Structure formats: C-alpha cells, structure tokens
Image: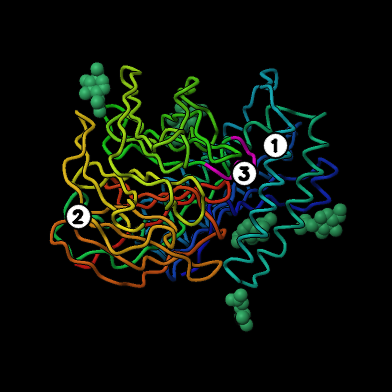
C-alpha cells in the first residue's frame, strides 16, 4: 500500500502565476487505499475576484465535478465519502466567491513560514523513509519553496484569503485522512478481546508537526483519552518540550482543532509537580505521568477537579529506562482492561514489570514480571491485558518483538514491524477506543492502526 500522509497537500498551480498574483491557488489532495485513488482539488481565486475569474472558476469547478463523478463510479466503496467531498468543495467555491474582503483576519505570517519549512522537512523525511521515487515528491519541494516566496508576497495582499486557505487545508487534510482510513474502518470489535493477539500494525496514518510548530520539541506525546468522559469523546491532547521534562498539556475539542492548533484548555503543571519521561496518557479525564525526582513516583492529575495525587511505585528502579530516553522509567498504559504501569525493578534484574492500577485509589492491584529487558526495549504498551514490547529493527523500522499475557502468564516472541518516521520516539501507547497506536516521534504526531488475529 502506498503510504501517503495527509500532509501531502500539493500547494501548487502555475508558479509564475502565483508569483504574479494573477493565477489560481490550487490545492490537490490525493489519497490512496489499495488500488483505488481519489483526487480532489480546491481552487481558491486570487484577491480581486474579477468576473472572468469567477466564470473560469465555475468552469473549473464543473470539470472538477465531472472528474469526481468519474471517480465515484470507479470506486463504489468511496461513493458516499466523495459526495460529501463534492458538496464541501462546491460550498468552498461559493464561500470564497462571496468572501467579505473587509473582514481581515489577523494572520501570523511568520508561523505560516515556519509551517512551510516544516512541510519541506517532512517531505524530505517522508521521501527518505518511504524510499519512493515519485515525480509527486520531486515537484513537492519546488512547490513548497515557491509557496514560501508567495507567502512573502501575499503578506501585502489579501490576508483573509490566506486564512481561508489555512482553514480549508486543515479540513481537506481531515477528509484525506478519513478517505485513507475508509478502507479499514471495519472495526466491529472495538472493546472486544475475543481475539488471538496482535497481528499487524498499519501506518503511519497521520503525520503532523506538533502544535508549537517547533521541530526542537522532540519530547512529548499526543493522543486521545482512552476512557473519555461524556461529551469529550473527540478530544485530543498534546504536550511537547525540548527536554524530557513534562510541564504542560493542551487539550483540543476535536481533530480539526488539533490541526488548527486551537486549544480548548491549557494545563501548566505548577512548580514541584512537573513530570519527566513523556510516557504519559490521559485516561478517564485524568493525566497519569511520572513525576521528576527520586524515587520514581506516579502522579495523577484529575482534570475534572484539578487535584493531584502521588504514589511511590514500590521497588521501581531508576537504572532501567527505555532505550530512547534516559528518564523513561514509568510508562503508563490503558487498554480494554483498564489502567497499567510498566517499569523495572532490581529484583527482576531490569526486566519489565507490569502493574495493574486501580483508578480510584491509584494503588497497585497486581504485579507480573516479564522477560523483556527494559533498556533493550524502545517502548511498550498494553492491549487486552497483553503487554507488547518494541525494539528497533533498523533506523526506519521498529518491531513488536515480545508479548506477555497477564491473563495466562504466557510470553511470546514475535516480529510485527512498525514503520518509523524517525529513529527515536518519546511516547508510544495503544488506545482501546479506536484500536490505534499513538506515537510522538521527533516532534511529529503519528498514529497506526492495530489489527488482531481473529
Ligand atoms: C491536480 O490534480 C488534477 C487531477 O489529477 C491535475 O489535472 C492537476 O494538474 C493537478 N494540479 C496540480 C497543480 O498538481
Ligand atoms: C456550507 O457553508 C456554510 C457556511 O458558509 C455552512 O453553514 C454550511 O453548513 C456548509 N454546508 C456544507 C454542506 O458543508
Ligand atoms: C530504495 O529502493 C531502491 C529500489 O527502488 C533500493 O535499491 C534501495 O536499496 C532502497 N533503499 C533503502 C534504504 O531501502
Ligand atoms: C518554482 O518557481 C520557479 C521559478 O521561480 C519555476 O521555474 C518552477 O517551475 C517552480 N516550480 C514549481 C513546482 O512550481
Ligand atoms: C476526578 O474527580 C472527580 C470529581 O471529584 C471524581 O468524580 C472522579 O472520580 C475523579 N476521577 C478519577 C480518575 O479519580
């Protein structure tokens, strides 16, 4: 399968036209799923909207509809999705045509420039990682570079148009992702553990630079609440930092808000409550993280009443962090069975110890010792009461190499590959709500679809 990031938004159109500000701003979005492919284009007019351009736009939009209709008949599976697309694109065309040019929205052009630099870095990395020779990738660089020039010129032109472009890109990106995942939404078994364990990990499905747009924020995490409280089912969380410390989180009401970096709330951890290690999660509207200091402590920040609780994790050793970060000693995980923490003890000689936690009391219910040496492990996660540990196979592949079933005490060696974007990553966890893995790698959000043996 061709792995295409939602970020591969082709900012294009004839470059010369772009530069002279007389042409069309064109966004192409391509999604591939198996053999089928859908291509959608959004045409945004230039600043002055002369009648001729509107006519041209209508013509182009008709051609676009024609093309999309052909696509629809080709891919019956995507039919419904594409019709929504079409409606959205028509709507967009109308809205751009009737744009009120007095309503200037303040835009941070510097951020846009940074974002473009990120696009460029991402394309380079994607190209290297995926090892594809595609003209699409080749022209993307030039187009992004041209786009940067255009952004500089646009600054003195119409600001509202740019904001529209940004919002529509985020929307299209979301749709592209829907389109990509359409093929494997078949997940009747969410919440069901009646399967024979991890079979494969597909993806990455989403790659997006962190909300700070800062590639130096290599430490952090992102994901969704694994047991959301009512009304917060579509909430996303993110925290990013330039060091392995944890001092703030952002919550976003949904995926679009995450992409637009428009947070619902921001939680700064007060002095003395800072965390470390980045293996934190949100479960039941509470953040679970490792507190800085010695011995390693677990902290729960209840976001409902903003209360903090601390527990010392009995026997937890400071000598056996995961291999990618020197301070990852306490790894929180949540699955269909509840809340877990993964650490290591001297007694177990550095092997991963699994503890089941009681949410209410924040106490340890049961403990299991596995056979995976923690310092040789990239990270680990729980799914259906089974711990899965990863290690690097090469610079672009991580593999799930070991599992320990707390239901049976059975351990297994396996080789399930996980395509990496960068060699190191700071946070990897499973979410039972959507059966996805969430990874924070080198400042980027990534997610994977998990498939189980039936
Ligand atoms: C957008 O996609 C359409 C259909 O594949 C193609 O004809 C057009 O050239 C593309 N535009 C750009 C600028 O890539
Ligand atoms: C079209 O855009 C308007 C806002 O201009 C919005 O209220 C409406 O819901 C949109 N319709 C669709 C189908 O997206
Ligand atoms: C990339 O693909 C080419 C063939 O398409 C192959 O020869 C080369 O070894 C690959 N490189 C990597 C790093 O996988
Ligand atoms: C970028 O701009 C240069 C000229 O400034 C032009 O030659 C080139 O074709 C453009 N590239 C793309 C992909 O638009
Ligand atoms: C968080 O606080 C609320 C209100 O005090 C309480 O109802 C809820 O059970 C707490 N959640 C956890 C996970 O302790």
Counting from the top left corner in percent of width and height, residue 284 is at 27, 32
Query: Sequence-wise, which precedes: disc 1 or disc 3?
Result: 3
Number of callouts in the render? 3
Q: Quadrant of ligand 1?
A: bottom right
Question: Which secondary structure, mark 3?
Answer: helix
Q: Nearer the viewer, residue 326 or 108?
A: 326
Q: Magenta segment range?
A: 212-219
Counting from the top left corner in percent of width and height, residue 349 is at 34, 58
**Residue that mark 2 sits on:** 189
What is the number of the mark on residue 112? 1
**Residue that mark 3 sits on:** 58
What is the number of the mark on residue 418? none
Query: Sequence-wise, which precedes: disc 1 or disc 2?
Result: 1
Principal secondary structure, stretch drawn in magenta: loop
- Of labels 1 and 3, the one closer to you: 1
Q: Is residue 104 above or below residue 250?
A: above
The answer, for residue 266, to whether it is visible in the render is no
Q: Residue 242 is drawn in which quadrant?
A: top right
Residue 217: say if magenta: yes
Relative side of 45 to 342, left or right: right
């Amino acid at each position: 399968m061709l792995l295409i990031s939602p970020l591969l938004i082709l900012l294009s159109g004839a470059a010369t036209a772009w530069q002279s500000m007389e042409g069309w701003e064109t966004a192409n979005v391509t999604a591939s799923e198996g053999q089928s492919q859908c291509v959608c284009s959004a045409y945004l007019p230039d600043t002055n909207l002369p009648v001729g351009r509107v006519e041209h736009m209508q013509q182009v939009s008709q051609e676009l509809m024609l093309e999309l209709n052909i696509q629809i008949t080709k891919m019956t599976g995507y039919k419904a999705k594409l019709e929504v697309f079409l409606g959205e694109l028509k709507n967009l065309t109308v809205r751009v045509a009737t744009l009120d040019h007095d309503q200037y929205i303040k835009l941070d052009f510097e951020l846009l420039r940074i974002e473009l630099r990120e696009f460029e870095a991402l394309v380079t990395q994607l190209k290297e990682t995926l090892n594809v020779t595609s003209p699409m990738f080749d022209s993307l660089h030039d187009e992004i570079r041209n786009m940067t020039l255009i952004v500089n010129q646009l600054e003195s032109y119409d600001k509202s148009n740019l904001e529209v472009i940004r919002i529509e890109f985020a929307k299209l990106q979301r749709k592209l992702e829907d389109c990509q995942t359409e093929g494997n939404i078949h997940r009747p078994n969410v919440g069901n553990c009646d399967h024979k364990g991890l079979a494969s990990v597909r993806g990455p499905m989403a790659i997006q630079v962190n909300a700070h747009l800062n590639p130096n924020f290599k430490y952090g995490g992102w994901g969704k609440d694994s047991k959301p409280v009512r009304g917060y089912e579509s909430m996303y969380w993110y925290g990013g930092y330039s060091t392995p410390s944890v001092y703030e989180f952002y919550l976003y009401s949904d995926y679009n808000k995450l992409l637009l970096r428009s947070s619902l709330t921001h939680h700064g951890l007060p002095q003395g409550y800072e965390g470390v290690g980045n293996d934190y999660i949100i479960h039941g509207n509470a953040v679970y993280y490792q507190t800085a200091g010695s011995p390693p402590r677990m902290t729960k920040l209840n976001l409902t009443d903003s209360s903090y609780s601390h527990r010392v994790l009995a026997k937890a050793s400071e000598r056996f962090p995961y291999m990618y970060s020197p301070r990852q000693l306490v790894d929180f995980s949540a699955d269909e069975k509840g809340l877990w923490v993964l650490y290591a003890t001297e007694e177990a000689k550095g092997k991963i110890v699994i503890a089941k936690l009681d949410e209410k009391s924040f106490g340890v219910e049961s403990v299991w010792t596995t056979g995976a040496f923690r310092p040789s492990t990239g990270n680990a996660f729980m799914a259906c009461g089974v711990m899965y540990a990863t290690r690097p196979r090469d610079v672009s592949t991580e593999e799930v190499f070991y599992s320990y079933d707390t239901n049976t005490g059975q351990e297994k060696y396996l080789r399930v590959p996980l395509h990496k974007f960068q060699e190191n990553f700071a946070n990897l966890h499973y979410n039972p709500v959507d059966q996805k893995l969430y990874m924070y790698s080198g400042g980027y959000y990534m997610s994977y679809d998990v498939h189980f043996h039936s």
